[in-house]
Image (cartoon, helix red, strand yellow):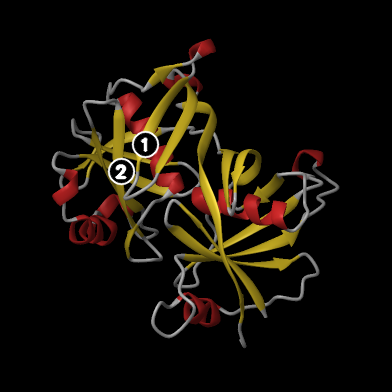
Amino acid sequence: MIFYKYQGAGNDFLIADNRDGSVALSERQIATLCDRRYGVGADGLMLLDAAEKHLSDASCCTDGFRMTYYNSDGSGGMMCGNGGRCIVAFAADMGIDTFSFDAADGHHYADIISVDGKEKTVRLQMKNVASYMHYDALTGVNVPSDGFFLDTGTRHYVRIVKGLDDYDVVSEGRDIRYNAHELQPIGANVNFMEPSDDGVLHVRTYEKGVEDETFACGTGIVASCVAAYKAGIRPSEILPGGHVRYDVKAKRDSLSVDFLPLDLCDGVAESVFLTGPATFVAKIEVDV
């Protein structure tokens, strides 16, 4: 079986072209492939599937493709922002020129802004953010805190912190992911965010399913930017039409998020876009 490895801001994935429907992997097989010691190694695995045609609902139809995403432990059913950019880059490398696709959280589209060798810069439309709540992981919901809970295609908890470079993301993230009562039983990814004097948001994320810190989390970066706006943190730029943009630094790479803030009665944010790198790493043939 042939996989193609891509990384988006250090978040790495194995991707297979499954438009013919020939790829069928068990949860255990996915976990083994993603294992960094006994497998190939990746934060997640994706299948580029043929687009589904829902004749009863024209809004679900697409001439693009379907992104099927799995965490490194084999669990699925969620969106991945860095994965979304990587599967768009992969689709382009496979000769697909319509970057319109369905994922677990709905329909998405994207543009490739630039190409530099094996790296593409992809601007990916994310789902609208319908609601949020203040949430203190220690004391409960709806209390004044620096914590927020949002769903940006995946469930996220965001905490504003100081001293992020030295923050114990793994132990703090694991504790919140498993022990915060209101997040159970599904759990949530846990993001720690710190604004800097130069207008850049610094974000680090503990991801469930990986059960460790990853170099970046796309849906978590989106959640952190929306939470930053709700917390009164000034955007990097005010765009025409009331849109805002935040520049973000993950562990190593830079990304940006732009969106239109909404009054809570209408939602939280719409026209949400995540922009960042997606880079081809290797073509890998494995026996499964």
Q: Please state if 171 lies on the left or on the right of 47 as rendered.
A: left
Amino acid on which the number 1 mark rests in the picture: Val
**Helix, strand or loop for disc 2:** strand
| Residue farthest toward the bottom in the current orientation of the protein | 287
The residue that appears at 61% across and 39% down in the rendered structure is: 114
The residue that appears at 43% across and 39% down in the rendered structure is: 255
262, above or below 60, in the image: above
Position of the N terminus, as image quadrant, is: bottom right
Position of the C terminus, as image quadrant, is: bottom right
Tell me, yes or no, whether the two marked residues, 1 and 2, touch with CB atoms within 8 Å.
Answer: yes
CA distance separating discs 1 and 2? 7 Å
The residue that appears at 33% across and 25% down in the rendered structure is: 230
Q: Which residue is mark 2?
A: 203
Give the percent coordinates (x, y) of residue 119.
56, 50
Amino acid on which the number 2 mark rests in the picture: Val
16, above or below 140, in the image: below
Give the percent coordinates (x, y) of residue 254.
40, 41
11, above or below 283, in the image: above
Q: Which residue is mark 1?
A: 248
Give the percent coordinates (x, y) of residue 227.
34, 32
Q: Please state if 112 lies on the left or on the right of 77 as rendered.
A: right
Label whose residue precedes the other's in the sequence (1 or 2): 2
